[in-house]
Image (cartoon, grey):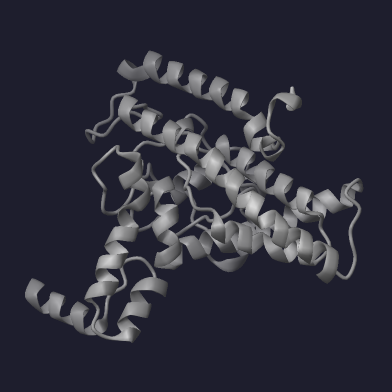
Amino acid sequence: MLDFLPAAMREPTVLAIPFFVIMLGLEYFAAAKLEHDEKTDDGRHERGAYDSKDTKASLWMGFVSIFTSAFGKFIALFGYSALYTYVAPWQLPIGAWYTWVIAFVALDFLFYWEHRTAHRVRLVWATHQAHHSSEYFNFSTALRQKWNNSLSMIMWAPLTALGFPPAVVFACYSLNLVYQFWIHTERVEKLPRPIEFVMNTPSHHRVHHGSDPEYLDRNYGGTLIIWDRLFGSFQPELFRPHYGLTKPVGTFNIWKLQTHEYVNLAHDVAGAPRVRDKLGYIFGPPGWEPAALKEQREKLAA
């Protein structure tokens, strides 16, 4: 089977596509069957519901991301190979079990910080926000991926500099993403406490996708939730989240979903009179604004 795929696409996320399709189909079928039994009191859509336009947008964004991700990995491979060959103090054997275990845990640790950066630095958020743009939370949301994975490729570079083979790094990253597919669902309630304490679960990830004040910028973990517990960003699920961005985009156009925040960022930077303010818009958190502008806005609101 692998011979039918280009070499750059012979990796876990692509090979898991049949699994993704089956799981998505089962959840969609369950949503259709349970639609009339799960009406909510607050006027929101039912748990685990699907919307055809939203799902179509997510699937197309995921389809395009396969190729942009492959291109990013192709470029990164040159740098990774150089680091592994000329910088690494040793070269860990690709066939040893401990190479894979250590690499997987180390990459998950770096994923936590890359993910946290994506939420706290607006330039990076401009890319990552596409994944959070759906107001639905189901398996199709997991496929609503960003098209620019440059920060990810930069974040994994230290692993090759420490002697992990590039193929192991790429594979562990893909396995991390495959794991995260199944936690995008409202059909799974909380799991046994030992699992909830260590692993990232649907309950934890629902919090992460919530736009409620209590849930913003929480639960960044990929496979393990222990990083959030260690670094103070953990939040348990207290109520059903409101999903999506705090300022909805209001479109299913995949190009606009991917680029609208870059447009807004460019507008803010162009209108900032001082270099310090321009840098604040770029590297500050989403929603940052100059103190003078914030004070003026608050006075007008009062």
Which one is in front, 38 or 168?
A: 168
Does residue 217 appear left or right of residue 191 in this picture? left
Does residue 161 appear left or right of residue 152 in this picture? right
Image quadrant occupied by the C terminus: bottom left
Which one is in front, 81 or 46?
A: 81
The image quadrant of residue 88 is: bottom right
Residue at 45% over, 54% down: 128
Residue 2 can be seen, yes or no: yes
Residue at 7% over, 75% down: 300
Percent across and percent down for residue 19 are 61, 25
Which one is in front, 223 or 72?
A: 72
Percent across and percent down for residue 28 are 44, 20
Which one is in front, 159 or 48?
A: 159
Image quadrant occupied by the N terminus: top right
Does residue 163 appear left or right of residue 215 in this picture? right
Percent across and percent down for residue 86 are 84, 69
Percent across and percent down for residue 235 are 49, 56
The image quadrant of residue 14 is: top right
